[in-house]
Amino acid sequence: MAFLMNQAEHSNAARQARKTAKRLSDATLELTGPARVRPDFLIVGAQRCGTTTMFKTLVQHPDVVRPFLRKGVHYFDKAYWRGERWYRGHFPLTVTTKLRGRGHRVLTGESSPYYMFHPLARQRLASDLPGVKLLVLLRDPVVRAYSAHSHEQARGFEDLDFEAAVEAEAGRVAGERERLMSDPGYDSFHWQHHAYVTRGQYIEQLRALEQLVGRERMCVVDSGDFFVNPEPVFDEVREFLGLAPCKDIVFEQHNARQRSPLGDELRLRLMDHYAPYDDELATWWGRTPSWRRSDA
């Protein structure tokens, strides 16, 4: 009994220590925020489309400084109530970037792939960061949905199999977008974790972003091309951000998960669902997505 009590006391003490450390961390972020730079770029989505790989590739560039604590801050979607000082506290000190640049400009940014899908996040970042550049990565939406399901299961956020989750999605997300829009303090678990099919309707999100920030501030990347032949795709991103050529970039794929093949019947049903969205995407984008090409 004494042993169990000691274990419980130790667990409580550990929780309290974590809470204290979190409070101190948040206080430090807010205190130092005004002395830090704002982000120059955001990787805003889409989830499970290679955003981590793109971020880890970008921060290899000598003129890119990574965020202070983490690659994804999730400020505009999950923590907007904390305020701009807290958000800026995640980025490098202004004096650090000046020293690092040695007379030329260096960039910083973050990767939060929920930004593109969260309806209020899009509005918030457009308002608060009027000059920020946005990177969007797109992947075969069927593969993306299946990958997202595996990801959510691994994190303990999903207990249905993929087909059941697809069938349940409409009921799960019904009304969630409207509630997010009407209640800035609302955090929708289903909209974030269970919108497997809806997130792959890329054209809806891209048009919403375009209306808010303009097409010229958006760089859309085909992840299929990036994974297969990364150098020319990264060159497009580099030029979009105004970065100089760099020979020392190492291209690796991150956060890939092994999973069993998706059944043909469900795969074809999802392909049919996405066909009109992909057609609109191709027209808007001015190119055929890799997953819709004849050799795909």
Image (cartoon, grey):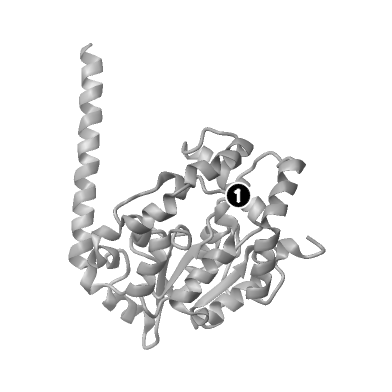
62 vs 30, left or right, is: right
Picture coordinates of residue 67, whole percent (x, y): 37, 65
Residue 224 visible at all: no
Residue 42: image location, x then y, percent = 44, 69
Q: Is residue 211 left or right of residue 50?
A: left
Residue nearer the viewer, 37 or 100? 37
State which quarter of the image contains the N terminus. Answer: top left
**x 41%, y 69%: residue:** 109
Pick whichever, 62 or 19, lies toward us.
19
Does residue 206 appear left or right of residue 233 in this picture? left
For residue 132, which quarter of the picture? Answer: bottom left
Picture coordinates of residue 191 (x, y %)? 46, 49
Q: Secondary structure at mark 1?
A: helix
Going by the picture, which residue comes out furthest to the right? Answer: 294
The amino acid type found where label 1 is placed reads Ala
Q: Residue at x 20, y 50 (%)?
A: 23
Callout 1 environment at 10 Å: few (<14), some (14 to 19), or many (20+)? many
Kindly tell me whether residue 142 is visible in this rendering.
yes
Q: Is residue 72 above or below residue 265?
A: below
Q: Nearer the viewer, residue 179 or 96?
A: 179
- Horizontally, is 82 left or right of 51 in the view? left
Question: Looking at the image, is 267 positioned above or below residue 93?
Answer: above
Residue identifier under label 1: 145
User: Which image quadrant: the C terminus?
Assistant: bottom right
Measured from the top left, where is residue 267 in percent x and y? 72, 46
Q: Residue at x 41, y 60 (%)?
A: 71
